[in-house]
Image: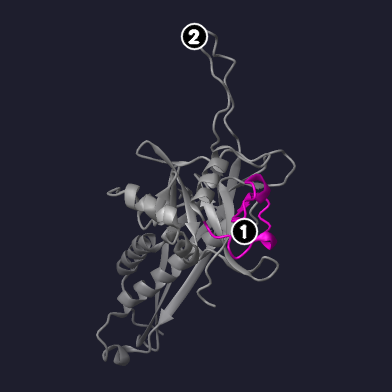
Amino acid sequence: MAQSSWASGLAVERWAKELMYEVGKEIYFEKFMGSGPDSLIQVKNELNGQSGDSVTFGLITNLSGSGISGDSTLEGNEESMGNFSQTVSTSMIRHAVRNTGRFDDSKVLYDFRVESLAVLKTWIAEYIDSQLFTNLVASCTYLFRADAGGDSVASRLSDDTDQLAAADLIVPADISALQKLAKVPGVSGQLRIRPIRVGGREYYVLLVHPEVAYDLKQNSTFTQALREAEVRGSENPLFSGAIGIWDGVVIHEHENISLFDDGGGGAVHGAHNLFLGAQAGVYATVGDPIWVEKSFDYGNQLGVAGGLIFGNAKVKFDSDGDSSDEDFAVIRYSTASTDFSA
């Protein structure tokens, strides 16, 4: 039995391309994404139009050799580039909406396809962001905790949240310490975390929970620095929405940063914030987003499905050949914070 259709194949293809465009704008991490290894989240679309279910990224490390001076022979004294890699497996996610029928549609002033695009692209983008945040904070190997009591930087690398007190809020000095730990690792086997380069300058990114951002904005040292030296006018997306820059660290806030309530032995509320450098994460897509339209009840009802085939992961590497993977460009920074839910 034949069914009437709501859209031609060309129309469906157009909506799929529109979904891809809109999803890209909605993904929070999009401002940190790029195809090169100097991006915070490196993106590859190598499987577009090809079969396969995984993508391998090469991890770039800094050269450590001293080079050759004068007319000394260079041939035979070359240095091997870092040969770490990260493989990302892809999978498909989908969701769908369905109207009640043409008669109900006639009562309201909206276009069902337009509204479907809006809710599906938001759902897909939020799903991708949630996956990235979950992966970046999971099983962190490089840790740092706040401490208002004067503990040394070295003693705080264990990130034992049982030792957190309610007063251990974020402070600018900790942001500087994180920046130095990225350049001069405080943990054996940790590679130097490469910064992101913008306009000839080096930057890292610190993602904090909005409660932590609130605490930072109450810090007089930080607010004074913003008044005197806030970066203005940059069109690079890295700075879009940033709450400030401190010591080469661009600070952003997002509600997906994970919270805890069991610090200090079970009584301290806080957040696991994320300090990130180049290639902290990887992201791969396969083909265009999915847009499928299906009619029901003799063409009276329309269902629209949207989805994406993609994969993402936090980058890890095996520094000493013991099969124990370490984070490549992530430091988890745990702080107490003001509890707005209390």
Q: Is residue 204 visible?
A: yes
Main SS of the magenta segment?
loop
- Relative image position of residue 231 (x, y in whole percent): 33, 48
Labelled disc at residue 138: 1
Q: Is residue 53 visible?
A: no
Q: Residues within 10 Å of mark 1 (few under 14, many from 20)?
A: few
- Relative image position of residue 245 (x, y in whole percent): 40, 49
* Quadrant, the N terminus: bottom left
Labelled disc at residue 70: 2
Front residue of 5/230: it is: 230
Q: How many marks?
A: 2
Work out which residue is located at the far left of the displayed protein and give it: 109
Residue 148 included in the magenta stretch of the image: yes
Amino acid residing under circle 1: Ala
At 68% across and 48% down in the image, what residue appears? 155
Part of the protein shown in magenta? 142-170
